[in-house]
Amino acid sequence: MCAKRLKLLTIVVLIALGAGRIGPALAANIAPGEDYANLRGQLLAEGWRPETGYGQKLSNGKPFHRFPEVLCGVDRCRAKWHDARGAERSIMLKRGGLTDPYSVIGEE
């Protein structure tokens, strides 16, 4: 009896988590391959707030990467945001070269 309840609870939680991840992503129109600078403008217009303390900063306070909410590895980056409802969201990016734009991989 307990095993059935645990299995049912697990399924309900997974469905709820999946619905929570898909809904805001569709509302924000996060599309793979999109230029991150364009997406950033759309997110700001929709009431999303960047987590500006997430990325690395230079000694003068400017962001180490192009945007203050972005933290990068060798070829991938993560941008942290809070959606219009205040929920934390992460967007994965493909790191561009020195002059190339960052492109969206998807929402994490």
Image: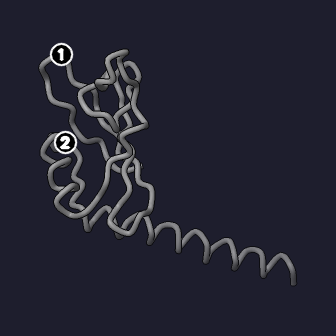
Residue 61's place in the image compared with 43, above or below, is above
Specify the amino acid type for callout 2: Gly
Looking at the rendered image, the disc whose residue lies closer to the viewer, 1 or 2, is: 1
**Quarter of the view holding residue 21:** bottom left
What residue appears at the point 35 percent right and 17 percent down from the top-left corner? Answer: 58
Identify the residue under disc 1.
98
Q: What is the secondary structure assignment of the residue under circle 2?
A: loop
Q: Is residue 30 left or right of residue 37?
A: right
What residue appears at the point 48 percent right and 67 percent down from the top-left corner? Answer: 18
What residue appears at the point 41 percent right and 64 percent down from the top-left corner? Answer: 86
Specify the amino acid type for callout 1: Leu
What residue appears at the point 45 percent right and 56 percent down from the top-left corner? Answer: 88
Q: Which residue, as the protein is rendered here, is positioned at the far front? A: 60
Image coordinates for residue 6, horizontal then vertical, percent = 77, 75
Image coordinates for residue 60, horizontal then vertical, percent = 32, 17
Image coordinates for residue 73, horizontal then vertical, percent = 41, 23
Identify the residue under disc 2.
33
